[in-house]
Image (tube, rainbow, N blue to C red):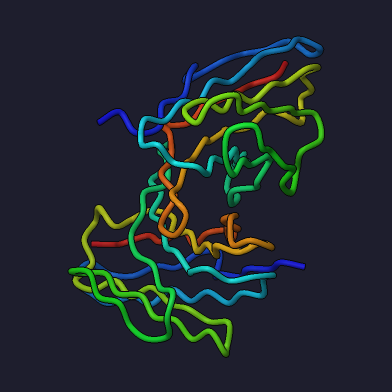
Amino acid sequence: NAGVTQTPKFRILKIGQSMTLQCTQDMNHNYMYWYRQDPGMGLKLIYYSVGAGITDKGEVPNGYNVSRSTTEDFPLRLELAAPSQTSVYFCASSPSNTEAFFGQGTRLTVV
Amino acid sequence: GQNIDQPTEMTATEGAIVQINCTYQTSGFNGLFWYQQHAGEAPTFLSYNVLDGLEEKGRFSSFLSRSKGYSYLLLKELQMKDSASYLCAVRGGDYGQNFVFGPGTRLSVLP
C-alpha cells in the first residue's frame, strides 16, 4: 500500500518563485491536511480539507493556497516564496474518527 | 483558543520506564493521539484515547483524563531506538476534524 505520497522530497526555491507541493493518498480518506514543521518545533496546520471541493484555513495559511478537486489529491501552492517558508512540509490524511497518516515530507529551502 | 503543553526534553536510561505528560485546552475533543517522530522522518502513530483510562499497546501505554485535560504516554523497557520526539495531538475543532499538535518532547535514551 502506498498510503500518503508527497513529491518532491527536497526543493530549493529562490525568493519570489512559485511551486506546488503534491500530495496524494490511496486510502479513500475524506480528511486531508497540510502541516509545516520548523526545526525543533511541533506541527502547525496550514490548510485542511474535509472532502473533495471543501477546504479551509488552519493556523498559518498566509502565503499558501490549496485545492481539492478529487478525494485522492490535495496539492499545496506557494505563490511568492519567502525565506520564512523554509520548512519541512507534511501532508496527512485521515478517516473520520481515527489517526492521521503522514507522508514522508518535503524539505523546502527558500534562498 | 487551543493550547497543548509538553515538556521540551527528557532523558532516561536504557531498560527504564519514562512518562511523558501532555496537558491540553482545545475547542472540541474527538480523541488524544500520540505520535513518535525520529529526526528527519515523518510522525508515526503510537496510540490514542477517546475515553478516560489507560490504553496498553506492548511497551507503550497512554492514559487520558478528559476532565483534567491531561494525558501521558508511558514507555517501558526503554531501548536506544526509542530516542525520538514524542508528539501529543488532540483531534478537535468545531467538527472534530483537525489534529492540533503540541511542541513535542525530545527523549534521549542513554546506555
Residue A21, given in percent of the width and then of the height, sits at 58, 20
Q: Would you identify the image quadrant in which residue A84 lies?
A: top right
The spot of residue B8 in percent (x, y) is 55, 64
Determine whether, in the image, residue B33 is placed left or right of residue B57: right
**B33 on left or right of B82:** right
Quadrant in which residue B54 is drawn: bottom left
Q: Is residue B45 above or below residue A22?
A: below
* Lateral position of residue B62 relative to residue B14, left or right: right
Q: What percent of the width, then of the height, locates residue B84? A: 38, 53
Q: Is residue B83 left or right of residue A40?
A: left
Residue depicted at x 38% and y 77%:
B19
Q: In which quadrant will I find the C terminus of chain B?
A: bottom left
How many numbered callouts?
A: 0
Q: Residue at x 40, y 32 (%)?
A: A4
Residue nearest the viewer, comparing B59 with A25: A25
What is the quadrant of the N terminus of chain B in the image? bottom right
Q: Residue at x 23, y 67 (%)?
A: B78
Judge by depth and name the residue closer to the eye, B75 or A23. A23
Image spot of residue B15 (x, y percent): 19, 71
Q: Nearer the viewer, residue B3 or A5?
A: A5
